[in-house]
Image: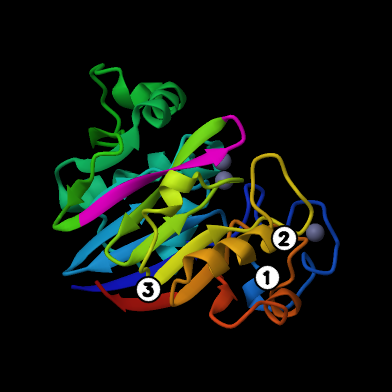
Amino acid sequence: MELKITVLGSGTSSGVPTIGCSCEVCRSTDPRDNRLRPSILISFSGRNIIIDTTPDFRAQVLRAKIARLDAIVYTHGHADHILGLDDVRPFNYHQGGRIPIYASRAAFAIIERMFAYVFDNRERKTHIPQLEVNLIDETPFDVFGLRFEAIPLAHGKDTTFGFRFGNVAYLTDHNEIPESSLDRLRGLDVLFLDALRHRPHPTHSTVEASIETARRLQACRTYFTHMCHDVGHAATEAMLPPGVFLAYDGLEINVAS
Ligand SMILES: [Zn+2]
Ligand SMILES: [Zn+2]
Ligand SMILES: [Zn+2]
């Protein structure tokens, strides 16, 4: 199966440029320094699956010209990963039917609270998202023929899910990857890793720590994501080892799975 991965957003929770900031990266004219909130699109056999619906979801969908959406897979329930959910309504309208979403029990509890009107089963005359909820755990699940494996990651005191599908793994929002999870990430063609900035952070990985993770896992290509304005694209990428890159919004990666 041929997979096409499109990076819809490579930025941290506040995006880059950051509101009110005039640092060098926020003022950069390099388009790769413009980062919407973190999300990827997985396209295969006419299907489109999105990981996370960020506050920039609408802008990301329009920019990537995504005409249909078949499923949403959630990493966790933080605002920068879920707040765009209401904007799936046009997909419901054009496609008909419910859109399946896949989330852990903990992530869904947050989504259900944040978007109470979507799940309260009240009669309405207005349009709300039409979703089919699938709760996931570490048991692999199938989305239109693509097998997903949820990989637990430590994100401060929370656990997020990274996902392995085929020989690709998307691991955002983690400051630590448990050994048992590392064991499930061998033989990858493409690996995405959280790399917020250079200075340590209680809930995110650093560029330096993720270089070390990339070295241990030896994927053919490793891309960093969830980056803040401390990380200038050109300057940072120049210091990365071979096979390790910074993701950027609009990056497309084709991979046989
Ligand atoms: Zn995040
Ligand atoms: Zn800045
Ligand atoms: Zn988070």
Q: Is residue 131 above or below residue 43?
A: above
Q: Residue at x 73, y 78 (%)?
A: 29
Task: Kindly check if marks 3 and 2 are in contact, taking CB atoms under 8 A apart as contact.
Answer: no
Q: Is residue 27 magenta?
A: no
- Name the disc covering residue 189, or none: 3
- What whole-number distance in Å separates the C-alpha atoms at marks 1 and 2? 8 Å
Q: Residue at x 58, y 45 (%)?
A: 176
Counting from the top left corner in percent of width and height, residue 45 is at 16, 69
Question: Which residues fall within the magenta stretch?
Answer: 147-157
Counting from the top left corner in percent of width and height, residue 218 is at 48, 71
Camera-side residue of 223 and 58 = 223
Name the kind of residue labelled 2 in the image: Pro
Counting from the top left corner in percent of width and height, residue 66 is at 33, 64
Counting from the top left corner in percent of width and height, residue 38 is at 52, 55
> Which is more foreground, mark 1 or mark 3?
3
Count of marks placed on residues: 3
Mark 2 residue's CB less than 8 Å from ligand 2: yes
Task: Kindly check if marks 1 and 2 are in contact, taking CB atoms under 8 A apart as contact.
Answer: yes
> Which is more foreground, mark 3 or mark 2?
3
Camera-side residue of 206 and 55 = 206
Q: Is residue 116 above or below residue 241?
A: above
Indicate the colouring scheme: rainbow
According to the image, label 1 marks what residue?
33
162 on left or right of 254? right
According to the image, label 2 marks what residue?
17
Camera-side residue of 218 and 147 = 218
Going from N to C along the chain, the mark reached first, 3 or 2, is: 2
